Amino acid sequence: MTTTVPTRPPRARSRTPFAPYLFLLPYLLIFLSFWAWPIVSSFLMSFKDSRLGAAAPYGVSNWSRLLQDEFFGTALRNTLVILVIQVPAMLSLATALAVALNSRLLRAAGLFRFAFFAPLVVGTVAYSAVFRLLFNTEYGMVNRALTGIGLPTVDWLNQGGPAMAVLILAMTWRWTGYNAIILLAGLQGIPEDVYEAASLDGASPWQQFWKITLPLLRPSLLFCVVLSVIGTLQLFTEPALITNSGPGNATMTLGTYLYQQGFRSFNFGYASAIAYTVAALAAVFSVVQLRLFGRDS
């Protein structure tokens, strides 16, 4: 005869509705202190003349000044020139590089992938100094190479057009490999069956690239475009270190002008207005790109 031992009913779990929020509280406090509040504070500061102190009245003088400031117009124009020239050229090179790195004919693919990604590992200050030395007018390697083949030297860093070209070359050298690795990941996600079916139908490699590779690579390309546009609108390090925003503000960007107003002139209110203008431009460009190129074909 077997006896059953009575078991105690399981105790109901104590449910504290605020327990998840207590665990999130440290992060929320840090988020509010170091991220949310500075954003709100800087936005409010953009409506005040910070040079008058805390008693300055709120107004729109900083925002109206943007429409009349010729230096802001110069910085915006230079930034858009870099955006229109450098970003398409860089992404075209990155796409071609990604296709080459994805080829089955390439041996030691891992080595080449690291080699083209390596510029991103180099510190921004270090590579800016190298480019400044390479394009030095008197003893730079670029001018020495030009004289070696019988061409005249160029005053790269003291003329507007050449200085802008140096910036575009430097940024292209640094970021092409980074975008190529992202596009390479997108290429590796395309099924091989699609290419095999296209080959059986008689499609040439060039037709496969335009009809298969680019359409299926569009999400990765869109991601690279959005990141590149936002990064270009925030461009600061290269013009500050390679050309010092010169000559004569020829390479001054929105980032360097913001720095000049905020940390040289200590006009933090106007600098905040510039910063929010940059953020608004980045948002507009991103939304336009997502609407134009993010739609399903």
Image: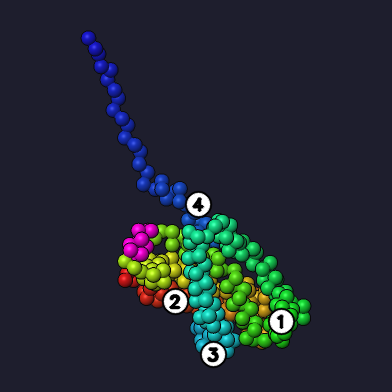
Question: Disc 1 marks which amino acid?
Answer: Ile
Q: Residues within 10 Å of mark 4 (few under 14, many from 20)?
A: few
Q: Earlier in the sequence, mark 1 or mark 3?
A: 3
Query: Does residue 11 lie above or below 224 as drawn?
Result: above
Q: Looking at the picture, does residue 2 appear above or below residue 113? A: above
Q: Which residues are magenta?
A: 191-200
Tell me the quarter of the picture where residue 77 sits. Answer: bottom right
Residue in view at x 54 percent, y 90 percent: 68
Q: Secondary structure at mark 4?
A: helix
Q: Does any portion of residue 49 appear in the rendered image?
A: no
Nearer to us: label 2 or label 3? 2
Which secondary structure class fits the magenta region best? helix
Q: Residue farthest to the left?
A: 1
- Please report whichever mark, 4 or 1, sits nearer to the chain's N-terminal start: 4
Mark 2 near mark 1, Cβ–Cβ under 8 Å? no
Task: Look at discs 1 and 3 and give the one toward the viewer.
Answer: 1
Q: Residue at x 35, y 41 (%)?
A: 15
Which label was assigned to residue 68? 3
Secondary structure under badge 2? Answer: helix
Looking at the image, tell me whether mark 3 or mark 4 is earlier in sequence order: 4
Residue 124's tag is: none
Of residue 34 and residue 233, the one placed in the foreground of this image is 233
Q: Is label 1 in a helix, a strand or a loop? A: loop
Mark 2, residue position: 285
- Mark 2 or 4: in front is 2
Q: Tell me the residue that label 4 is attached to.
A: 26
**Amino acid, disc 3:** Gln
Give the residue number, with chain letter if any, for mark 1: 149
